[in-house]
């Protein structure tokens, strides 16, 4: 069976190829574009997933010749492409490279862009289909959208093809600003043409949550409050904020990661089975979860936040958050955040979902651990099961992608000692193909117009509704607790679980 556009990207079997189109990247000289987007485009081209007419247009404040732009793209590919540099793929991609220099508010630059896209339609057959990727700070979204609208570039109806905009988080910094941003986007594009990237949804292991839950018999019967004690969702990084002070300070861990990546992981873990994998059906289920989320009554004990201090990590003396370049010495931005949440539904009644994320933690790891209740009764005496913990299913999102199941097993010998063991599925062992980078998948889906992996405005707003009270509470109450680099966050995060009689996993 061949794939059909009626199947969404989640359940299509054969990879679809992008239609004739261009991708215009605003802010192409920025870090994200250089390290992730350009190489993702190349990887797609190299895998044969782009149409021969495909053209990549860079838009940035540089006075570059086309040769200089080609050199920039080639360097980005050589430095970052997953599939390795191949001269033939590069030569093909190179034919479709164009560069438009100008500031984001320069009407003449948009005129040059209009001419460039017309030229591409004419000479390369991009068929009027143009994707605008705003890889720029959100403060530039209004001016870019305004200019795209004024120059007629955003208008799908006037053009013979489609016009889409792809944007990156942050989608506002609270509910009100998220709504303002939606207004800005809506002034130029229809909702169906707006693709919001949450790159976690492009990860193979994240999409596999749906396969695990809905393609198998074994797990779903246990996936509820009768059997699940609690769920822990961790996104830990061992790096600090690096050179990103300008973006990170004032934003912090909760807005940077919980509002988007972790709440999306929670939604996929907790949602009901969608009727189909069509975008509307998947989104409807995620929205139900996000609308059913509830914060604990006491935010002082049900949340935690921290800031890394100076200290040793991996044999290196690390600067504290407040000593990082361009961070004000009195910054109260959190580099670690943890939250307790409940999903008020019959399936999840009273089951806590513990979320945590932070920089400068023990190691880079993202995982979802579904921790089961202890057996109601075991016919062993207590000393036999002293070393037996709760059964758990751990989805290892990254690195070392896979799934671990932890359960008790008899220790070989004449006595009856039961101890935790694990059963493991690793992508590296089970599959020969490498997983594509999240951006490859998402850029391709945006070009195809396939939207189940892109959060909608309603999801964005529901996520802010959950986070806003926590951020308000933190703003009014104290400052982040210090934590040493290389450990697993501040004392408050450990107490948050200890009070409930539980412990964080050390991944
Ligand atoms: C981004 C955050 O969304 O995700 C960064 O803004 C973080 O702060 C990054 O470092 C981590 O992404 P990944 O895919 O490496 O887990």
Image (tube, rainbow, N blue to C red):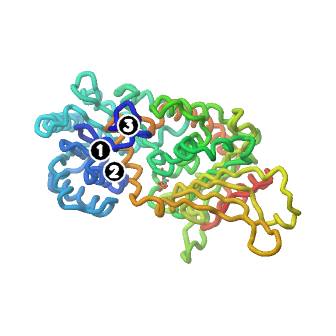
In the rendering, which numbered label is found on residue 25? 1
Tell me which residue sits at (32%, 38%) in the image: 2
How far, Cα to Cα, is label 2 from label 3? 18 Å
The answer to whether the residue labelled 2 contacts the one labelled 3, judged by CB atoms less than 8 Å apart, is: no
- Mark whose residue sits in front, 2 or 3: 2
Q: Are marks 2 and 1 in contact (CB under 8 Å)?
A: yes
Q: Is residue 344 left or right of residue 357?
A: right
Q: Secondary structure at mark 2?
A: helix
Q: Which residue is mark 2?
A: 37
Label 3 residue SS: helix
Tell me where residue 464 appears, x and y as whole percent: 57, 36
Q: Secondary structure at mark 1?
A: strand
Residue 291 % position (x, y): 62, 31
Q: Is residue 374 above or below residue 24?
A: below
Q: Would residue 29 appear left or right of 108 to someone viewing this image?
A: right
Instruction: List the residue tagged with mark 3.
Output: 141
| Disc nearer the start of the sequence (2/3) | 2
């Amino acid at each position: 069976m061949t794939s059909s556009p009626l199947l969404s990207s989640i359940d299509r079997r054969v990879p679809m190829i992008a239609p004739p189109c261009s991708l215009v990247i605003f802010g192409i000289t920025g870090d994200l574009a250089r390290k992730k987007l350009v190489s993702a485009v190349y990887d797609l081209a190299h895998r044969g997933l782009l149409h021969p007419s495909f053209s990549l247009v860079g838009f940035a404040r540089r006075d570059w010749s086309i040769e200089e732009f080609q050199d920039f793209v080639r360097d980005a590919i050589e430095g970052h492409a997953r599939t390795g540099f191949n001269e033939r793929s590069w030569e093909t991609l190179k034919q479709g490279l164009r560069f438009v220099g100008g500031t984001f508010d320069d009407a003449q630059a948009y005129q040059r862009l209009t001419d460039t896209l017309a030229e591409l339609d004419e000479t390369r057959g991009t068929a009027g289909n143009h994707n605008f990727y705003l890889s720029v700070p959100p403060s530039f979204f209004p001016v870019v959208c305004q200019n795209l609208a004024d120059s007629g570039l955003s208008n799908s109806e006037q053009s013979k093809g489609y016009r889409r905009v792809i944007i990156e988080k942050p989608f506002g910094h609270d509910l009100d600003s998220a709504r303002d941003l939606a207004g800005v986007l809506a002034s130029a594009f229809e909702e169906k043409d707006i693709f919001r990237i949450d790159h976690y949804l492009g990860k193979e292991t994240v999409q596999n949550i749906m396969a695990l839950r809905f393609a198998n018999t074994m797990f779903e019967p246990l996936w509820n409050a009768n059997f699940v004690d609690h769920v822990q969702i961790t996104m830990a990084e061992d790096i600090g904020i690096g050179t990103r002070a300008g973006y990170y300070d004032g934003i912090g861990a909760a807005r940077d990661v919980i509002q988007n990546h972790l709440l999306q992981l929670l939604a996929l873990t907790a949602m009901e089975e969608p009727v189909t994998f069509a975008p509307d059906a998947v989104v409807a289920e995620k929205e139900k979860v996000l609308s059913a989320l509830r914060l604990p009554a006491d935010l002082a004990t049900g949340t935690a936040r921290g800031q890394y201090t100076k200290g040793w990590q991996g044999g290196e003396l690390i600067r504290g958050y407040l000593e990082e370049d361009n961070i004000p010495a009195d910054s109260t931005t959190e580099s670690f955040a943890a939250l307790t949440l409940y999903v008020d539904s019959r399936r999840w009644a009273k089951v806590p979902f513990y979320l945590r994320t932070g920089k400068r933690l023990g190691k880079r790891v993202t995982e979802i651990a579904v921790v089961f209740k202890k057996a109601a009764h075991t016919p062993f005496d207590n000393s036999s099961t002293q070393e037996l913990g709760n059964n758990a299913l751990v989805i290892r999102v990254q690195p070392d992608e896979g799934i671990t199941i932890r359960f008790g097993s008899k220790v070989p010998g004449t006595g009856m000692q039961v101890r935790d063991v694990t059963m493991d599925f690793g992508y590296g062992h089970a599959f020969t193909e490498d997983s594509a980078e999240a951006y490859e998948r998402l850029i391709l889906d945006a070009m195809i117009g396939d939207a189940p992996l892109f959060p909608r405005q309603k999801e964005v707003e529901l996520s802010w509704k959950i986070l806003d009270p926590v951020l308000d509470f933190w703003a009014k109450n104290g400052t982040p607790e210090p934590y040493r680099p290389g450990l697993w966050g501040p004392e408050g995060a450990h107490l948050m679980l200890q009070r409930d009689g539980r412990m964080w996993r050390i991944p």
